[in-house]
Image (spheres, helix red, strand yellow):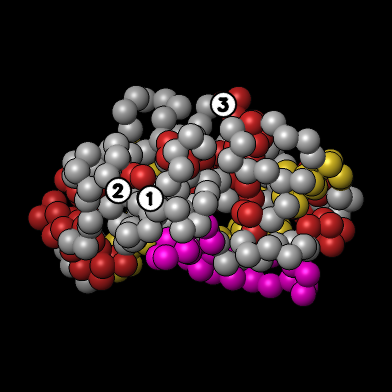
C-alpha cells in the first residue's frame, strides 16, 4: 500500500471541502472518502486505487447520516448506516422487504457490520482484469488501454448495458432494490446539496468506463429516500450464486408487485449480476403491467428484458439463468401474503 494522508471530517460540509479537488472522475480523485473502507482499502492494497488523502466521514454517523427515519413519503436512510443495522431494521423488514433482504444476502456478517450504505452503492467491480494490475488492458483502471475481459475469461461478466470498452458487471445487491423502488439520493457537494434519482447515479460504461457515476469530486452521498408503495410491501430479493453465502450474484432480481387479484397493477424490477450498472428492467415491467401474472406471462417479460443481452462466450449461460431468476422472483412475490 502506498503512503497516504489521513484526515477526519467533523461534518458533511467540511468533508466536501476537503475532497473538492480537480479530477476527471470521482473514483480517480486523489482524495477519497472512507467510512467502513471494506472496498477502498482492498483496492489500495492491490494498488488499483492510489489516493493521496483519505477523509474519514464516520463522525457523520452521529447525526442524521447514521439514522433510519420514517417519513410521510416512505423512509429516509442515512448513508452512514451500517449494512447490518439496515438489514435488521423492523421498518425495512416489514414495509420494504426487498431492501432488507438484499442487504442480508450481501457479503459476510463481518463485512455487513463494517460497511456503510453510501459506500456500498459505490463499490467497484470485482472483474479480475480490473483488480489485478498485472493485466495491462483495463479501461476502468487505465482509460484507453482496452478490455482484456472481451476475449478473456468472462464467466462473471455483464450481458446487459455492455460496450466494446467494458463488460465488467456491477457487483452489489442493495442497489438493485433501490433502483427498482425509484429511490432518490441526497448529495452534498462543493456547490451545495442536490437530490438525484438513484437510477441516474451510475453511468453505463459506453466509451468512458472509468467515469462510473454522475458524482463529481467532493460530492458526498448523505442519504437515500425510498418511497413507500404497495409494490414495496409485496417485494423480495432473489439471488442466484455459485455458493450459498459470501458470493457475488450470477443473477439476481429485486421484484415488487402491486396486484389487483392476479392482474398486475404495478411492478418494479431491478436486476443484478447480469449488468454493468444496477439495472431497472423496464421492458419486463412494461410487458407485465395490466396482465394476469402467471408463469407464461413472467417468461414472456423475462424474454423481453434479455432480448438485448450481449454475451462473450463464458457468460452465455447468464441469459437463461437471468431469465429464470426473474421468473422465479415474480412467482414468489405473487405468492407472498401481505
Residue 66 seen:
no
Tell me the element at label 1: loop
Q: Are marks 2 and 1 in contact (CB under 8 Å)?
A: yes
Give the mark nearer the N terminus: 3 vs 1. 3
Give the residue pinned by disc 1: 147
Q: Is residue 193 left or right of residue 113?
A: right
Tell me the element at label 3: helix
As drawn, the label of residue 129 is: none
The quarter of the image holding the N terminus is top right
Give the mark nearer the N terminus: 3 vs 2. 3
Q: Quadrant of residue 256?
A: bottom left
Residue 308 seen:
yes
Give the residue pinned by disc 2: 150
- Separation of disc 3 and disc 1 at Cα? 33 Å
Residue range highlighted in magenta: 185-211
Q: Quadrant of residue 249?
A: top left
Q: Is residue 74 left or right of residue 192?
A: left
Task: Where is residue 18? Give x, y as percent.
Answer: 84, 57
As drawn, the label of residue 109 is: 3
The residue at 72%/46% (across/down) is 51
Tell me the element at label 2: helix
Task: Where is residue 279? Give x, y as percent.
Answer: 38, 58
42 vs 180: above or below: above
User: Which tag is nearer the camera, tag 3 or tag 1?
Assistant: 1
Residue nearest the viewer, comparing 283 with 74: 283
Amino acid at each position: 500500500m502506498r503512503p497516504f494522508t489521513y484526515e477526519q471530517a467533523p461534518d458533511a460540509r467540511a468533508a466536501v471541502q476537503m475532497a473538492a479537488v480537480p479530477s476527471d472522475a470521482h473514483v480517480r480523485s486523489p482524495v477519497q472518502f472512507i467510512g467502513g473502507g471494506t472496498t477502498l482499502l482492498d483496492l489500495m492494497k492491490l494498488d488499483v486505487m492510489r489516493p493521496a488523502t483519505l477523509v474519514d466521514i464516520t463522525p457523520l454517523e452521529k447525526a442524521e447520516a447514521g439514522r433510519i427515519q420514517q417519513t410521510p413519503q416512505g423512509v429516509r436512510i442515512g448513508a452512514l448506516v451500517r449494512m447490518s443495522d439496515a438489514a435488521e431494521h423492523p421498518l425495512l423488514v416489514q414495509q420494504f422487504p426487498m431492501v432488507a433482504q438484499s442487504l442480508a444476502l450481501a457479503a459476510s456478517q463481518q463485512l455487513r457490520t463494517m460497511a456503510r450504505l453510501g459506500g456500498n452503492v459505490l463499490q467497484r467491480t470485482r472483474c479480475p482484469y480490473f483488480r489485478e494490475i498485472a493485466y495491462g488492458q483495463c479501461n476502468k483502471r487505465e482509460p484507453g488501454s482496452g478490455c482484456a475481459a472481451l476475449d478473456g475469461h468472462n464467466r462473471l461478466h455483464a450481458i446487459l448495458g455492455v460496450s466494446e470498452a467494458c463488460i465488467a458487471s456491477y457487483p452489489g445487491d442493495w442497489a438493485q432494490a433501490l433502483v427498482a423502488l425509484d429511490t432518490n439520493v441526497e448529495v452534498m457537494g462543493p456547490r451545495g446539496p442536490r437530490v438525484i434519482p438513484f437510477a441516474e447515479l451510475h453511468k453505463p460504461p459506453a466509451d468512458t468506463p472509468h467515469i462510473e457515476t454522475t458524482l463529481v469530486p467532493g460530492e458526498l452521498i448523505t442519504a437515500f429516500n425510498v418511497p413507500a408503495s404497495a409494490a414495496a410491501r409485496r417485494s423480495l430479493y432473489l439471488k442466484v450464486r455459485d455458493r450459498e453465502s459470501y458470493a457475488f450474484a450470477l443473477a439476481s432480481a429485486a421484484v415488487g408487485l402491486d396486484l389487483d387479484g392476479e392482474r398486475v397493477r404495478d411492478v418494479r424490477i431491478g436486476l443484478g449480476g447480469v449488468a454493468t450498472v444496477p439495472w431497472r428492467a423496464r421492458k419486463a415491467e412494461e410487458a407485465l403491467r395490466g396482465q394476469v401474472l402467471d408463469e407464461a406471462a413472467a417468461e414472456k417479460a423475462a424474454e423481453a428484458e434479455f432480448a438485448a443481452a450481449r454475451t462473450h462466450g463464458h457468460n452465455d449461460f447468464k441469459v437463461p439463468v437471468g431469465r429464470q431468476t426473474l421468473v422465479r422472483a415474480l412467482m414468489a412475490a405473487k405468492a407472498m401474503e401481505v
